[in-house]
Image (cartoon, rainbow, N blue to C red):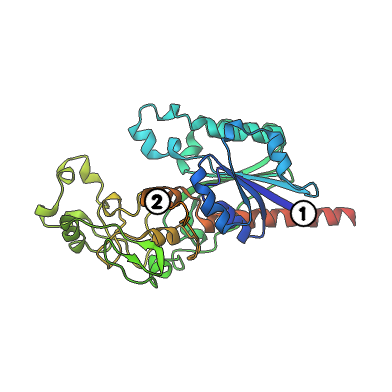
């Protein structure tokens, strides 16, 4: 059977790359952000379409699939900021965020085009929201078999302690994620992922790879990281180095800020500001700097040669950080892809038995 996918909210292609590695032909990726085009098209076979999902129609999507395709797959990861724990805690009106409507738009497109298989990835907090309940019910009402689970990414070979919600749905029959491939004894660690990269000083760039670049540190922050132990906290510093916010009650509950990663564990969750030493536990395990852009990308399981910088239109560090931090980890995308391929193969085998 011939099958192909379209990737909504594709960003720079983390999910697309994973699906391709699993053997799925991705026809196109669609995203509102034009600055994702270069990285998406430079690393994937699919074409990038810059468009607002709320203005795309089911007819537009159907036209993207080749006529000879037997099974149409639609995947997507709606921007997760409105569903994140941070947003719900610190924005009183977070639930009213305009991006909530994107998941409803995704559901409307599904109802209109009825793809054979659907995959959706997002933050774990989404599962407790009305929009997710509505999304599932809409799929069930039109005949989809659904499974969903919160995935601990190290269980599938991602060198990062990220948790994500993955939903799979199929018109063909029961569908679920493949079993975990790793356990606490075999997790891919920070050392496994980035231990072989050339050493860097804060503020320096590897002449062989412009993505292997580290943010500069102030004299004070250099002293702080030199006082930090892998896995330790700012509470171990000399009090002269501690910030005012650390001494407040609200700051005392964030001990990992300004911390170093541990070599022999998966990294913390890579956020959109991972390249800044003060933004989380993003200090290199033994070099006096925050991790580089390339290191953050590798911890998101992007291939080491993934291209992010368009020579004609280079982006700044902040823009690239947002792209990497918001991406679906490639390895998780591959797991989703393998789950879909195995599901299709099982369906084919059942059909063959029915025929014979």
Q: Which residue reaches farthest left?
A: 240
Residue at 53 percent across and 30 percent down: it is: 101
Q: Judge left or right: residue 273 versus residue 227.
A: right
Identify the residue position indicated by label 2 in the image: 321
Q: Is residue 21 above or below residue 128?
A: below
Q: Nearer the viewer, residue 56 or 145?
A: 56
Q: What is the distance, in whole Å, between disc 2 and disc 1 at their CAs? A: 36 Å
Q: Determine the image quadrant of residue 253.
A: top left
Whether residue 335 is visible here, answered yes or no, is no
Q: Position of residue 302 (x, y in %)?
A: 49, 60
245 to the left or right of 83: left
Q: Is residue 299 visible?
A: yes
215 on left or right of 330: left
Q: Is residue 51 above or below residue 1?
A: above
Q: Residue at x 59, y 57 (%)?
A: 44
Q: Secondary structure at mark 1?
A: loop
Q: Position of residue 279 (x, y in %)?
A: 29, 49
Question: Mark 2 or mark 1, which has the lower sequence index?
Answer: 1
Report the front residue among 105 and 340.
105
Secondary structure found at label 2? helix
Q: Which residue is mark 1?
A: 2
Q: Which picture quadrant has residue 252? A: top left
Picture coordinates of residue 290 (x, y %)?
A: 30, 59
Residue at x 39%, y 39% (from the top left corner): 85
Quarter of the image containing the N terminus?
bottom right
Quarter placement of the C terminus: bottom right
Q: Position of residue 137 (x, y in %)?
A: 62, 32
Near-viewer residue (251 or 349): 251
């Amino acid at each position: 059977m011939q099958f192909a996918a379209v990737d909504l909210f594709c960003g720079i292609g983390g999910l697309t790359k994973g699906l391709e590695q699993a053997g799925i032909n991705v026809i196109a990726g669609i995203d509102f952000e034009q600055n994702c085009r270069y990285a998406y098209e430079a690393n994937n076979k699919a074409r990038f379409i810059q468009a607002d999902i709320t203005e795309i129609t089911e007819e537009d999507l159907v036209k993207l699939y080749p006529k000879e395709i037997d099974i149409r797959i639609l995947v997507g990861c709606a921007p997760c900021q409105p569903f994140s724990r941070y947003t719900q805690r610190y924005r009183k009106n977070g639930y009213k965020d305009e991006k909530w409507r994107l998941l409803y738009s995704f559901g409307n497109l599904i109802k209109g085009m009825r793809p054979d298989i659907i995959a959706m990835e997002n933050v774990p907090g989404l599962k407790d929201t009305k929009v997710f309940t509505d999304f599932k019910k809409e799929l069930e009402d039109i005949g989809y078999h659904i499974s969903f689970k919160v995935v601990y990414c190290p269980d599938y070979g991602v060198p990062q302690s990220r948790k994500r919600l993955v939903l799979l749905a199929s018109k063909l029959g029961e569908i679920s994620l493949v079993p975990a491939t790793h356990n606490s004894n075999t997790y891919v660690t920070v050392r496994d992922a980035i231990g072989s990269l050339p050493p860097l000083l804060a503020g320096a760039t590897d002449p062989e790879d412009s993505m292997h670049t580290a943010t500069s540190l102030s004299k004070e922050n250099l002293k702080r990281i030199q006082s930090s132990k892998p896995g330790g906290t700012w509470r171990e510093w000399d009090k002269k180095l501690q910030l005012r916010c650390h001494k407040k009650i609200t700051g005392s509950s964030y001990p990992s800020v300004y911390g170093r990663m541990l070599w022999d564990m998966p990294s913390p969750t890579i956020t959109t500001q991972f390249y800044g030493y003060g933004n989380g536990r993003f200090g290199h395990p033994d070099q006096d700097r925050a991790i580089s852009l390339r290191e953050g990308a590798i911890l998101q399981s992007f291939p080491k040669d993934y291209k992010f910088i368009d020579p004609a239109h280079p982006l700044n560090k902040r823009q690239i950080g947002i792209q990497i931090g918001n991406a679906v980890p490639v390895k998780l995308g591959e797991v989703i892809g393998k789950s879909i391929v195995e599901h299709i193969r099982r369906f084919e085998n059942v059909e063959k038995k029915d025929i014979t």
